[in-house]
């Protein structure tokens, strides 16, 4: 007969000592019957071990018999715990030693942040679409942010606003690798948002190509599909009625888009597929640039009123671009050193840098052109910035297109010169440099071209009379050979 509160001890050879704590397959409290507990499949008895208290005697569950076989000289955790309890002389609560757990947690993958799009009312003006998102801070905290996508007039439906917000979502999820392939339209929107050049004239031309050609044709295509079929782009460019130079600019911009797509990890890094696209006849012009003779220039000048006449004089005598002429200020003119500093340009009222770093340079001033500028300085309208050519109504630079449309082209048509523009004077300047016999390197410096090939191949052409004179010399040498004189003949015979 066993005492009523005594639990049975299993036949374990290691538990022969009567001073050791009793071991059972279940947890027993004083005065309670041992009740067998069923363990769920795949769980260990230790996972169901209840916290020990003074009212609860120490008991260690027996490991199942079907557990991993022990190695030689390996001590059982059950026996080790029993020895700890025996050496401590405890009859009450025993603190279990902490067992380090080696659980492996997978790397947490960053979730794609789509944000939430809402329509926000305004007291004045049209309602706007607002994208709300979260921004991570240092220490793991997140802050709520919002940004306006556009007005309801720009995006009448929420679907269109969602499409417009996709470019911003790609920016917010720059560390996230998208599972789906992005479209050309999404890439274009992000390029306009993040990578558009700062120069106004470049931005204007790029925007025209993106919204007028690339996005309407290829906006719904995904990057991978179009990249795998570059011939589609080549065939499309071949069918466009535009000039070969315009086609080359479109192809170059698409090449730039794919470079940024790989940079932003919107596609895998590979050879740019636009390198396989060929555009024929890039160096060929559809219309030969107009070049004026000196006589034609003298006939045209009196038909143009001031201050536009002085602008034409500077354009023809210095070869400056019209944007550079409109960007001149009086502090750029050094009358003592006879030097003109070119460092800014104005395009449609926007003040910006010049076309390239080579365009920013000092231009020599002839004393005659310096007198022209001094004469104009007396009648020049005053402005806060000191513009050479400021509109007296706005005190800001003029718009070049309006001057050409209202004054220069009507005067040229009156003389029967055909359609000319501001750049006609720059082409004429390059041609006159050839007439003077200036070295090609000097011509490049005066034209302020980055590449000498531009000076040689794009600008200028020989005057007809110059070509006629050079050709006549060849004709006379071939058809009318000079008869050597007697003294020359004697020299030649003596030399032989």
Image: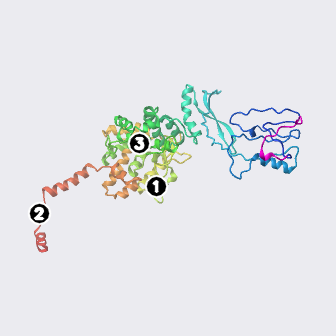
Identify the residue shown where x is 86% and y is 39%.
56
Q: Residues within 10 Å of mark 3 (few under 14, many from 20)?
A: many
Q: Earlier in the sequence, mark 2 or mark 1?
A: 1
| Residue under numbered circle 3 | 274
| Residue under numbered circle 1 | 361
Confirm whether the magenta stretch covers residue 107: no
Residue 231 visible to the viewer: yes
Which quarter shows the C terminus? bottom left
Q: Which of marks 1 and 3 is nearer the N terminus?
A: 3
Please provide percent x and percent y for residue 319. 39, 50
Residue at the front extreme, as displayed: 1
Q: Which of marks 3 and 2 is nearer the N terminus?
A: 3
- Above or below residue 312? Residue 181 is above
Measure the C-alpha gap from mark 1 to mark 3. 35 Å
Please provide percent x and percent y for residue 450. 41, 53
Which structural element holds mark 3?
helix
Which quarter shows the N terminus? top right
- Above or below residue 55? Residue 122 is above
């Amino acid at each position: 007969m066993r005492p009523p509160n005594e639990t049975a001890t299993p036949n374990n050879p290691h538990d022969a000592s009567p001073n050791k704590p009793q071991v059972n397959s279940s947890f027993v409290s004083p005065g309670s019957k041992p009740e067998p507990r069923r363990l769920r499949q795949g769980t260990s008895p230790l996972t169901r071990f209840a916290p020990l208290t003074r009212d609860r005697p120490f008991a260690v569950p027996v490991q199942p018999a079907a557990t991993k076989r022990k190695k030689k000289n390996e001590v059982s955790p059950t026996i080790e715990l029993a020895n700890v309890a025996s050496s401590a002389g405890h009859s009450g609560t025993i603190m279990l030693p902490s067992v380090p757990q080696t659980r492996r947690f997978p790397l947490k993958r960053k979730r794609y942040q789509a944000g939430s799009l809402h329509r926000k009312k305004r007291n004045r003006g049209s309602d706007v679409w607002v994208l709300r998102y979260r921004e991570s801070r240092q220490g793991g905290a997140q802050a709520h942010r919002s940004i306006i996508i556009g007005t309801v007039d720009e995006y009448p439906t929420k679907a269109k606003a969602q499409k417009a917000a996709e470019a911003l979502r790609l920016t917010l999820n720059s560390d996230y690798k998208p599972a789906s392939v992005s479209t050309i339209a999404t890439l274009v929107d992000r390029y306009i948002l993040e990578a558009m050049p700062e120069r106004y004239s470049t931005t204007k031309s790029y925007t025209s190509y993106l919204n007028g050609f690339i996005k309407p044709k290829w906006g719904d295509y995904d990057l991978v599909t179009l990249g795998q079929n570059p011939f589609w782009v080549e065939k499309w460019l071949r069918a466009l009625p535009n000039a070969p130079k315009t086609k080359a600019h479109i192809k170059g911009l698409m090449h730039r888009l794919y470079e940024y797509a790989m940079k932003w990890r919107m596609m895998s890094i590979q050879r740019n597929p636009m390198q396989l696209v060929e555009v024929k006849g890039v160096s060929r012009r559809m219309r030969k640039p107009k070049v004026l003779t000196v006589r034609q220039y003298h006939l045209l000048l009196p038909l143009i009123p001031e201050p536009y006449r002085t602008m034409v004089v500077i354009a023809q005598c210095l070869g400056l671009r019209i944007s550079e002429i409109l960007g001149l200020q009086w502090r750029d003119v050094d009358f003592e050193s006879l030097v003109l500093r070119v460092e800014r340009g104005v395009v449609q009222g926007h003040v910006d840098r010049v076309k390239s770093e080579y365009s920013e340079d000092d231009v020599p001033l002839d004393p005659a052109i310096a007198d022209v500028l001094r004469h104009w300085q007396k009648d020049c309208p005053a402005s806060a910035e000191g513009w050479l050519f400021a509109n007296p109504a706005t005190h800001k630079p003029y718009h070049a297109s309006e001057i050409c449309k209202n004054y220069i082209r009507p005067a040229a048509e009156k003389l029967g010169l055909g359609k000319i523009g501001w750049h006609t004077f720059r082409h004429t300047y390059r041609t006159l440099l050839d007439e003077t016999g200036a070295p090609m390197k000097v011509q490049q410096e005066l034209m302020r071209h980055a590449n000498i090939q531009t000076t040689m191949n794009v600008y200028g052409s020989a005057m007809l009379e110059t070509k006629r004179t050079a050709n006549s010399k060849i004709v006379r040498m071939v058809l009318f050979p000079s008869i050597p004189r007697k003294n020359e003949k004697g020299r030649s015979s003596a030399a032989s």
